[in-house]
Amino acid sequence: MFHSTLKVGNWGEVVIHTLALFGALVAGLALFHALLFLYRHTLRPSSRLVEKYRGDWALVTGASYGVGAGFARECARRGLNLVLIARSAEKLAAVAADCESYGVAVRSITFDLAGASETEWDELFRSLEDLPISFLINNAGVNVEYPTEFVDMDEDTIDRIVQVNVQAVNRMTRRTLPIMIRRKRGCLIFLSSAGGAVVPSPLLSVYGGTKAYVDSFAIALSGEVRRHNITVLSLTPFWITSEMSKIRRSNWMVPSADTFARLALNRLGLELRSNPHWAHELIALGLRATHRLPGQVAYVERLHRRIRERALRKRKQRT
């Protein structure tokens, strides 16, 4: 008959040793991720992938201001010719002039991604048939003016957010991807958002939902196109200076659009999903480490309600 040789006291030592080992593993894992974070943001050499496409064409949507304009200028600085698409001809002209100063060719196209008819979509891509488009930067996006509950949003606003943030991304990608596949080269960059793709976004539920779609779409698509030598990058930032964010001045937590574009292109080919600004990745890691999902929902909901209250007070003061 089998008799255990372990005494009660020995079981206590086993438990203590097991807990100590578990604690050491957790600490080691945390140290590993901390060192990996430092490496990504300080020591790792920047991607040089864009240089391989110098002289090719990049198509940038929502290029008239903010992140889109930042990407346009950074692509031009790295020698890419540009097709710039946005609704405002005047703003596009200013961005185009900035880009042309780098000695690249620029085509500016005034186009409404939400309101265009099938005929207008066809005309757009017929006008681009002669261009070897190797880069598509799906940047265009719209949101509500300030955080708003879903039940208080009108249906036209909901439809416009979905049309620009999802349907236009699908159309642009579906029309340009075959060109890249035929040429066996290309890059697809998708502007998702931390609000939706990384953490929940109550009071911006439609916007967050569309951005979660963009991220999921990009990640899945990467598995389909990698055999064609096509690189995919899904960007999930928090705040960037732009008209959409209503933040005009950059700081340690909020990079300028040009800085963000530079950091993003430095990650191309090195990461599939990226928070290229160190503070944004740190915020994401902190939220996930300190809050379970219900806690994240509650935290962001309170944050967005405060933002909404401030916006409504300012609006009332103006009137």
Image (spheres, grey):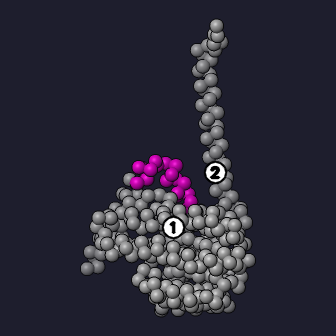
User: Total of numbered circles in the picture?
Assistant: 2
Q: Is residue 73 magenta?
A: no
Q: Which residues are magenta?
A: 276-297
Q: Which residue is mark 2?
A: 33
Q: Nearer the viewer, mark 2 or mark 1?
A: 1
Q: Which residue is mark 1?
A: 214
Compared with 122, 277 (above or below) is above
Residue 125: which quarter of the image?
bottom right
Q: Where's residue 72, x and y in %?
A: 59, 82
State the residue lying farthest toward the top. 1
How dense is the environment of label 1, judged by Cα within 10 Å: few (below 14), some, or many (20 and up)?
Answer: many
Is residue 246 in view from this perspective?
A: no
First in residue order: circle 2 vs circle 1: 2
Q: Out of 146 and 49, give the one closest to the viewer.
A: 49
Name the quadrant of the C terminus.
Answer: bottom left
Q: Where's residue 312, x and y in %?
A: 30, 70
Residue 128 in the figure: left or right of residue 51: left
Which residue shows up at 59% across the image and 25% down it?
A: 15
Q: Main secondary structure of the magenta part?
A: helix
Name the quadrant of the N terminus.
Answer: top right
Task: Say which amino acid is labelled 1.
Answer: Val
Which residue shows up at 69% across the image and 70% down it?
A: 228
Badge 1 marks a residue whose secondary structure is: helix
Q: Out of 299 and 150, give the one closest to the viewer.
A: 150
Which residue shows up at 59% across the image and 82% down it?
A: 59
Q: Where's residue 165, x and y in %?
A: 46, 72
Q: Out of 170 and 119, give the one closest to the viewer.
A: 119
How dense is the environment of label 2, judged by Cα within 10 Å: few (below 14), some, or many (20 and up)?
Answer: few
